[in-house]
């Protein structure tokens, strides 16, 4: 099949499926976008807990009975 025939077949299939294609010079591709992902909100309790666990990981604390 020639390239022209492939293009025609592709256009016919897209029309049947009702799928729109944006051209390569479309503004969607030219403008940058910011994607914002929302996560679980941080509560005061979890913030305090994370600070405490961070402190424990840095603190030279030993729980041996020899001291």
Image (spheres, grey):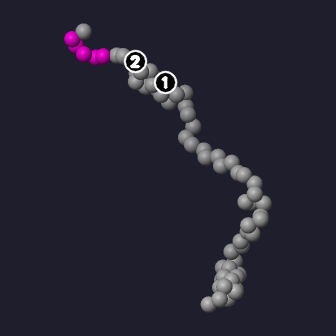
Question: Gap between marks 1 and 2, in whole Å?
Answer: 12 Å
Q: Which tag is nearer the camera, tag 1 or tag 2?
A: 2
Say whether marks 1 and 2 touch (CB < 8 Å): no
Magenta stretch secondary structure, dominant:
loop
**Residue 29 in the image: x percent, y percent?**
73, 60
Identify the residue at horizontal 43%, vertical 25% (top origin): 53
Residue 49 located within the stretch drawn in magenta: no
Q: Is residue 40 above or below residue 10?
A: above
**Residue 30 in the image: x percent, y percent?**
75, 57
Label 2's element?
loop
Quadrant of the drawing holding the C terminus: top left
Dot 2: few (<14), some (14–19), or many (≥20) neighbours within 10 Å? few
Q: Which residues are magenta?
A: 62-66
**Residue 33 in the image: x percent, y percent?**
70, 51
Residue farthest toward the bottom in the current orientation of the protein: 1
Q: Which residue is mark 1?
A: 51
Q: Which residue is mark 2?
A: 59
Residue farthest toward the left in the current orientation of the protein: 66
């Amino acid at each position: 099949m020639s390239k022209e025939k492939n293009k025609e077949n592709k256009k016919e299939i897209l029309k049947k499926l009702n799928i729109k294609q944006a051209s390569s010079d479309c503004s969607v591709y030219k403008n940058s976008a910011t994607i914002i992902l929302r996560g679980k909100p941080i509560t005061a309790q979890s913030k305090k807990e994370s600070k405490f666990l961070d402190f424990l990981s840095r603190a030279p604390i030993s729980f041996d009975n020899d001291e």
